[in-house]
Image: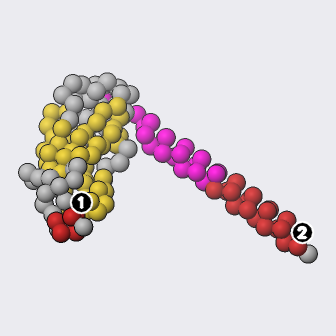
Amino acid sequence: MKKIIALALLVTLGVTTSNAQETSKKLKAKNTKIASAKVNGAGMVFVTETIDYGTIAANSDGRREFVFTNNGNKPLIITNAQGSCGCTVPTYPKQPIAPGAKGVIGVKYDTSRAGQPFTKTVTLTTNAVTPSKTLTIKGNVLPLEAAKS
C-alpha cells in the first residue's frame, strides 16, 4: 500500500512539474513576441513601464532604471524627459538609439520626503510612432523615526 501511495505522489509531482515548465515556456514565448513586434519608424518597448520601489528607508538611494529597446526600423531620438514634480529627476540618452539597440532611462526620486507613499511619472518626448510615453514610479518612504531603528 505504501508503494502505491509513493508511486501516486511521484506521478503527481512529475506531472505538476512538467506543466509548470510548459507554462513558463509559453509565457517566455509570448513575451518574446511582444518585445520583437516591429514598427515602421522608431519605436520603444520597455521591459516594464512601472517601477515599484516598495517600502524604502528615508534618505536611501532613489535611483532606478527603465530599460527599453528600439523595436523600429529607424533610429529613436528622445528629445525630452520630464518628471511630474521636482522630486523626480529623469536622465535619458542624448544620442540616437539604433534599431534593435537598447537604452536606459534613469530616474532619481528624492527619498528625503519621508513618511509618505508616492506615485510619480516621467513623460518622454520622442520621434517614435507614438511620440509621447509615460513611465511610472511608486513606493513608500519610511518615516525618519522608523528608518533610524
Residue 94 position, x and y percent, is 18, 28
Magenta-tinted stretch = 21-41
Q: Which mark is residue 57?
A: 1
Question: Residue 102, located in which quarter of the rendered image?
Answer: top left
The amino acid sitting under disc 1 is Ala
Image point (64%, 51%), residue name: 22
Q: Visible in this render: residue 88? A: yes
- Ranked by sequence position, the earlier of labels 2 and 1 is 2
Q: Could you say which is closer to the camera, residue 50 or residue 26? A: 50
User: On the picture, is 140 further left or further right than 83?
Assistant: right
Image point (60%, 54%), residue name: 23
Q: Which mark is residue 136?
A: none
Disc 2: which residue: 3
Image point (14%, 53%), residue name: 110
Residue 60 position, x and y percent, is 22, 53
Q: For the residues carrying marks 2 and 1, which lies nearer the camera in this image? A: 1
Q: Could you say which is closer to the camera, residue 91 or residue 63? A: 63
The amino acid sitting under disc 2 is Lys
SS state under label 1: loop
**Residue that sits furthest to the left in the current view:** 86
Image point (11%, 53%), residue name: 87
Question: Residue 53, located in which quarter of the rendered image?
Answer: bottom left
